Image (cartoon, rainbow, N blue to C red):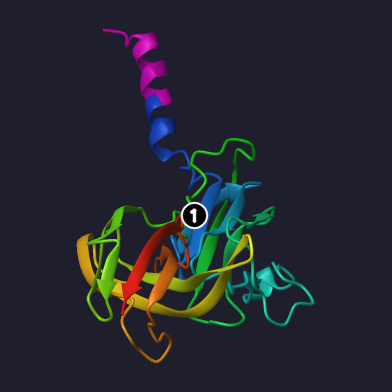
Amino acid sequence: MPRCPHRAVAAAVAAALIWAPTALGANQRVAISDYRWSEPELQLDLGEHVTWYWTGPDTMHSVTGVSPNARGIESDPDVSMPNHPVGDSFQVSFDEPGLYSFHCRLHSSVRGTVEVSPDPGDPITEPDPIPPNRVDATPPLMTEVRLAGPSFRRGRGRLHFALGERATVNAEYWRLRRRGARPRRDYRGWQEWSAHIGYNDLRFATRGPRFNPRPGRYVAIVDATDASSNTGRAHRLHFSILP
């Protein structure tokens, strides 16, 4: 019985697909963060590219070619101490097959490789999203800020508030005086506390190396600063220290 020509063609196509060289990868986006590449071993096809993003919090890194075929590839030419703004990027296209090696000039452990196949690739399509920045730019949320009472004797003030994250709470103390028809504020010192998430109840306007409470009328400027140096909204608290 003669063999069906359609089946022979289908078998030949299937065999060609099985034995055809497979593409290694596509254009890649890599985050430099926590002293490493998010993808240390990359695979591309010919003509495709890699884009590195400095996402922080550490940004003093370069992308420097170290293998012979990568010599001359440098994100920070003529810069001895590279330091990029968060979100900055550097892109390299690869037009020759081979294995390319890179590292950071300041931190040799921040490194990776790019393997480029001889198969033509797609230099346009970007399959990966842009890596998000890893720097906290949101100030701490400080709510329900109040004193236990508007007047108190020295050493008996209490400050209440709630925090959405751990932070350092700072209070600047200004004494209020009146000279003629105009009030005057005299700076008297400051105080700070390490505060936790949730409700906090702290001793307020107490004597210390930076503030010596005296009887009188005061206003305190209170705010919170998180570990990323973000400072939230300031709160004004008026109070009196009794004799």
Name the magenta segment's main secondary structure: helix
Element type where label 1 sits in the image: loop
**How many marks can you see?**
1
Judge by depth and name the residue closer to the eye, 36 or 71.
Answer: 36
- Relative to 127, is 53 above or below? below
* Residue 35 shows in this picture: no
Judge by depth and name the residue closer to the eye, 27 or 144.
Answer: 144
- Relative to 217, is 88 above or below? above
Give the residue pinned by disc 1. 133
Which quadrant of the structure image shows residue 80? bottom right
Q: Is residue 79 left or right of residue 137?
A: right
Instruction: Identify which residue is drawn at 71% across, 67% down.
Output: 73
* Residue 188 shows in this picture: yes
Q: Is residue 10 left or right of residue 157?
A: right
Instruction: Identify which residue is drawn at 47% across, 62% down.
Output: 230
Q: Can you give x and y, in whole percent of width and height, for residue 224 in the image? A: 40, 64
